[in-house]
Amino acid sequence: GENVEQHPSTLSVQEGDSAVIKCTYSDSASNYFPWYKQELGKRPQLIIDIRSNVGEKKDQRIAVTLNKTAKHFSLHITETQPEDSAVYFCAAPPYKLIFGTGTLLAIQP
Amino acid sequence: KAGVTQTPRYLIKTRGQQVTLSCSPISGHRSVSWYQQTPGQGLQFLFEYFSETQRNKGNFPGRFSGRQFSNSRSEMNVSTLELGDSALYLCASSLIGGERNFGEGSWLTVV
């Protein structure tokens, strides 16, 4: 069945450093890999996504890489800022969007 | 454009009661998904509807049900409430295979 594993569950980095969150999925038919950010008390919001026909996508300080052979994809945040503190969720279909368990990212000033 | 609207935002129910939550999707979105969010379990998929048909279902007991109307609005119902049903219930609408747009959620507390 579908399964998405996300690591780490918590991550603390110094402001200005980089953060990397990794997810693995089980269904080889998965073809769309979004990342959501959820700030405390707010709704999850899409920050970046990637489709299976590309290996990497970048949007300013955020990038996502995909390794279809190994069935994992990662979120990279560079030059972290305090406003990056939130819970980040990865997700994978193909038939229903299954979310990872989330990563609480804390940016230390 | 207006976002996803969920009502009610907050509610308190007693064990054994039932509850109905409503979700109005973004105009033009025909796919609606429901998720349960709890601190220890993250975002758990409940079900997904498209054109009034349930397309996918998560691993929840039969006490959890839903439906979608012809205008794409969706409702979910939980019967015989248990303390463990206390959670944030999130609805997300999308075009087929597209970005899920989440509502603010309905906070359910069962006492």
Image (cartoon, grey):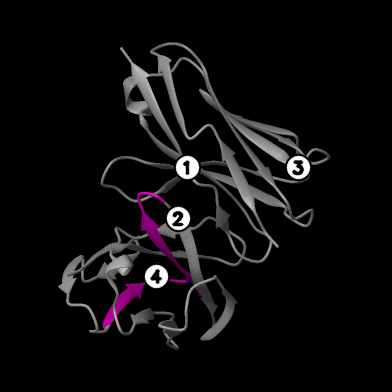
For the C terminus of chain A, give its image quadrant.
Answer: top left
> Which residue lies under the disc numbered 3?
A71
Q: Is residue A72 left or right of residue A13?
A: right
Determine whether label 2 and label 1 are within 8 Å by CB: yes
Q: Secondary structure at mark 1?
A: loop
State whether the magenta stretch is mostly helix, strand or loop: strand
Q: Residue at left 43%, top 16%?
A: A13
> Which residue lies under the disc numbered 1?
A102
Residue B25 - label: 4
> Which residue lies under the disc numbered 2?
B43
Q: Residue at left 75%, top 55%?
A: A27
Q: Amino acid at mark 2?
A: Leu
The reply to whether residue A59 is in sight is no
Q: Is residue B65 left or right of residue B2?
A: right
- Along the polypeptide, which appears first: circle 4 or circle 2? 4
Q: Amino acid at mark 1?
A: Gly
Residues behind callouts 1 and 4 on a single chain = no
Q: Secondary structure at mark 3?
A: loop
For the N terminus of chain A, give its image quadrant.
Answer: bottom right
- Does the segment drawn in magenta span residue B27? yes
Residue B73 - label: none
Q: CA distance from mark 1 to mark 4?
A: 25 Å
Q: Which residues are magenta?
A: B19-40
Residues behind callouts 2 and 3 on a single chain = no
